[in-house]
């Protein structure tokens, strides 16, 4: 189900979406959560239906090792950000800084997967983090920081998932293997 990364993009997109919806209360938040869950489920079902069974299969050991190194470093930096921001009593900075780290991690992944298009979510996630920092630097409320970073990040990851599924569906329609 996580072939070609669509499952991961969908679920992490949902995580960012939930961060964005934390800016709302009551019924509005409930509706937004339901919408986010529906989008995530829809993406996962679309991946299952439209991506070939070979998509996202195993790749060579050297690529797997590099992928693991990149992700390990990403998670180490995320933990460090959370610890430092919490100790500095600045939890509002966690989402923007994490978005920047996640965006940066897509740059080497573009080379590992030989997918230059991964530079698109890299740029958008870095922009999401920078936008959140800009809101914070202009004394915007914490909930606006969460909304901006979460919304841009979620839409970016979901957009990448859609791009992956539609690209595979279009290639299949034209008899091309990806």
Image (cartoon, rainbow, N blue to C red):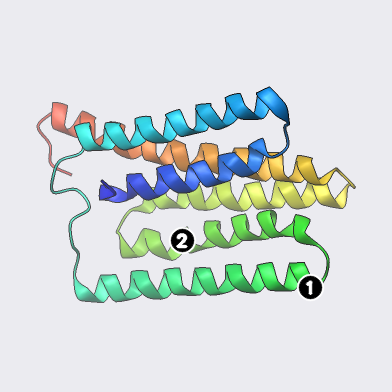
The numbered disc on residue 25 is none
Q: For marks 2 and 1, give the CA distance.
A: 29 Å
Mark 2 / mark 1, whichever is N-terminal: 1
Q: Is residue 40 above or below residue 153?
A: above
Picture quarter containing residue 33?
top right
Measured as percent of width and height from the top left, residue 125 is found at 57, 50
Q: Are marks 2 and 1 in contact (CB under 8 Å)?
A: no
Residue positioned most to the front: 26
Q: Residues within 10 Å of mark 1 (few under 14, many from 20)?
A: few
Identify the residue at horizontal 57%, vertical 39% (top origin): 17
- Give the camera-side residue of 93 and 89: 89
Measured as percent of width and height from the top left, residue 27 is found at 67, 23
Q: Is residue 99 above or below residue 151?
A: below
Q: Is residue 10 left or right of residue 57?
A: right
Measured as percent of width and height from the top left, residue 24 is found at 72, 32
Q: Secondary structure at mark 2?
A: helix
Residue pointed to by mark 1? 87
Q: Is residue 16 left or right of residue 116?
A: right
Residue pointed to by mark 2? 107
Q: Which quarter of the rendered picture does the C terminus lie within?
A: top left
Measured as percent of width and height from the top left, residue 73 is found at 49, 74
Q: Is residue 120 left or right of residue 22?
A: left
Q: Is residue 34 above or below residue 103?
A: above
Q: Secondary structure at mark 1?
A: helix
The mark lying in front, picked from 2 and 1, is 1
In this rendering, the count of numbered labels is 2
Q: Residues within 10 Å of mark 2 (few under 14, many from 20)?
A: many
- Give the camera-side residue of 1 and 124: 1
- Give the camera-side residue of 174 and 88: 88
Q: Is residue 1 left or right of residue 123?
A: left
Identify the residue at horizontal 82%, vertical 50% (top origin): 136
Identify the residue at horizontal 38%, vertical 40% (top origin): 161
């Amino acid at each position: 189900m996580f072939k070609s990364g669509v499952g991961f993009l969908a679920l992490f997109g949902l995580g960012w979406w939930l961060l964005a919806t934390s800016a709302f209360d009551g019924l509005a938040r409930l509706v937004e959560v339901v919408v986010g869950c529906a989008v995530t489920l829809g993406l996962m079902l679309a991946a299952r239906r439209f991506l070939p069974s070979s998509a996202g299969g195993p790749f060579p050991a050297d690529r797997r090792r590099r992928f693991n190194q990149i992700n390990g470093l990403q998670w180490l930096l995320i933990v460090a950000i959370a610890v430092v921001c919490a100790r500095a009593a600045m939890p509002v900075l966690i989402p923007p800084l994490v978005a920047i780290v996640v965006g940066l991690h897509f740059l080497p992944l573009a080379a590992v997967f030989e997918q230059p298009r991964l530079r698109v979510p890299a740029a958008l996630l870095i922009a999401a983090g920078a936008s959140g920092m800009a809101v914070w630097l202009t004394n915007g409320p914490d909930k606006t920081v969460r909304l901006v970073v979460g919304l841009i990040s979620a839409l970016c990851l979901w957009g990448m998932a859609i791009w992956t599924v539609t690209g595979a569906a279009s290639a299949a329609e034209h008899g091309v293997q990806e």
